[in-house]
Image (tube, grey):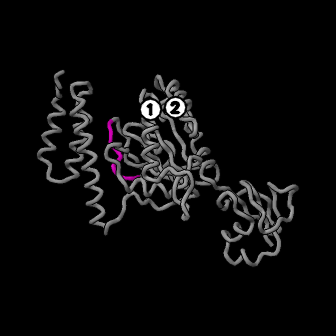
Amino acid sequence: MPANLTPQYQEAEDAYKAALTNDERLAALEDMLAYIPKHKGTEKMQADIKKRLSKLRAEIIEERGRKGGKVDPYRVQKEGAAQAFVIGPVNSGKSSIVGWLTNAKVAIADYPFSTTVPVSGMMQYEDIKMQLVDTPPIIMEDPVSSLFSNARLCDVLMIVLDASDQSSVYVLDALSELLKSRKTLVDSTDASGAGITRGRLLVVANKMDLEPSRENLSTMRELLPDYKYLACSALSGEGMPDIPAAVFELSGIVRVYAKPPGGRLERKDPFVVKRGATVEDVAGVIHKQLQHSFKNARLWGSSRYSGQSVPRDYLVSDGDIIEFS
């Protein structure tokens, strides 16, 4: 089948040949991929462009690292109550989801590789904010090692898939195996707490506004039942408000509120601790000195009765209010 290349593609290819910098080459390659006709006659050309894009992105990241003192662009400083890395294949809609939920200035386009470096934004969940990190698409044939080593350190890993793609179940299976081989998806975390267990992985099936997304999601759930799935559409908004609650649930954190002695009983400005934290741990988060100096703790929420005095090793629950004295 003839390629039947468009004039726009030819212009983009000429721009690529005339480019003097990697940034110019990247822009030209992105245009080539956007303008190339999508049919069987161009499949090899598309694959070649994608391969060149992947290699060039890695070179650009390496260049920026050298200029900035070998800074790892995938090392994103954690902000907010929890951090979730958002990963997925090309055109899964990761950036659209992150843009929908946060204040991040993500690049949203109808062609692959519009995200070239990680971009983070803050997502609101009730009275706390959590960080979403949009990452460049994963190329199965040429994955970036730094992405996986840093994803091991986050609280929640979100895999975004184009559920309208018939191959989505195979993509998820292959991506899961890749995560395991890179020691990102693990059965249990290491001594430092690094690694993502299945209980902290969320599969977001995007593009539910398209057919046959629901049928494909049903197949994923049947063949790969060990993951938590969430159906959504960044276009229609279906399921989008459910993502913050899902990330919060998987992050393993709880919110605890401090009541000043004699003060009002209200849930405002929470302190965030890991699930399994004790009253003593909460005191340490508020102030190190308080951790050692408080004599009594009264609790409203998970205790048997309101205002009950609880011991230092009492395990707190989400929404508990504590008064230290």
Amino acid at pointer 2: Met
The span shown in magenta is: 111-118
The image's mark for residue 264 is none
Q: Is residue 17 left or right of residue 269?
A: left
Q: Position of residue 205 (x, y in %)?
A: 50, 35
Q: Quadrant of the C terminus?
A: bottom right
**Residue sitting at 58 percent across and 57 percent down?**
81
- Magenta span includes 117: yes
Q: Residues within 10 Å of mark 2 (few under 14, many from 20)?
A: many
Quarter residue 63 falls in: bottom left
Question: Do we see residue 237 in this rendering?
Answer: no
Q: Are marks 1 and 2 in contact (CB under 8 Å)?
A: yes
Observer able to see residue 42: yes
Q: Is residue 201 above or below residue 70?
A: above
Residue beneath the point at 71% across and 59% down: 256
The percent coordinates of residue 58 (x first, y second) are 28, 53
Q: Quadrant of the N terminus?
A: top left
Mark 1 or mark 2, which has the lower sequence index? Answer: 1
Q: In this figure, which residue is indicated by the disc labeled 2?
A: 220
* x 55%, y 57%: residue: 189
Residue at which label 1 appears: 168
Q: Nearer the viewer, residue 139 or 230?
A: 139
Q: Is residue 218 left or right of residue 177?
A: right
**What kind of element bears circle 1?**
helix
User: How many numbered circles does the render carry?
Assistant: 2
72 left or right of 22? right
The residue most toward the top is: 1
Circle 1: residue type: Ser
Q: Residue 50 placed where, x, y %?
A: 27, 40
Q: How far separated are the C-alphas under marks 1 and 2?
A: 8 Å
Residue 169 in the magenta stretch? The answer is no
For label 1, count other residues whose C-alpha is less than 10 Å away and answer few (under 14), some (14-19) or many (20+): many
